[in-house]
Image (cartoon, helix red, strand yellow):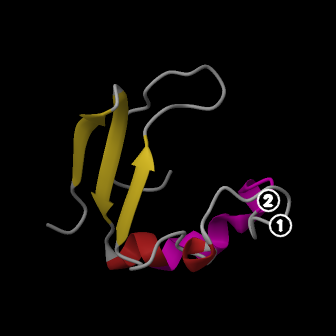
Amino acid sequence: ESGQMVRFAWRKLPIFVVNRTKEQLADLPGLDPRLRDPECKETSQQPSYCQNAWRSIKPEWLVMIGICTHLGCVPDYYGQIK
């Protein structure tokens, strides 16, 4: 369902699968100023087919390892961009 997230474990890592809403997708370009490297030009960990504004093959789907790069914690999902 749009706006929902599912969590599961893969190789002992938390995986988040998010079905993004149209509003979330529309808000993404406005968040670029908050990103250190919005175009993934420095050291991209994204495969070439995901080097786009959505960082996914299909814009509505986001699949990621759910670990904070700062402290290694597992962040909560609020369903909206704050």
Residue 57's quadrant in the figure? bottom left
Residue 58 x/y as whole percent: 39, 80
Say whether residue 77 is magenta.
Answer: no
Residue 3 x/y as whole percent: 25, 62
Magenta stretch in the rendered image: 26-37
Query: Viewer-proximal residue, 9 or 59?
Result: 9
Write down the residue under mark 1.
41
Query: Viewer-proximal residue, 53 or 47?
Result: 47
Position of residue 36 in the picture relative to residue 69 (left or right) = right
Say whether residue 27 is magenta.
Answer: yes
Tell me, yes or no, if residue 78 can be seen here.
no
Please identify, in this view, whether the residue under mark 2 or under mark 1 is nearer the observer. 1
Query: Viewer-proximal residue, 57 or 70?
Result: 57
The residue carrying pointer 2 sits among few (fewer than 14), some (14 to 19) or many (20 or more) residues within 10 Å by Cα, namely few
Position of residue 30 in the picture relative to residue 54 (left or right) = right
Write down the residue under mark 2.
37
Residue 6 x/y as whole percent: 21, 47
Residue drawn where x is 73% and y is 55% of the image = 34
Three-letter amino acid code at the position of disc 2: Asp
Three-letter amino acid code at the position of disc 1: Lys
The N terminus lies in which quarter of the figure? bottom left
Residues at circles 2 and 1 in contact by the CB criterion of under 8 Å: yes
Q: Residue furthest right?
A: 42
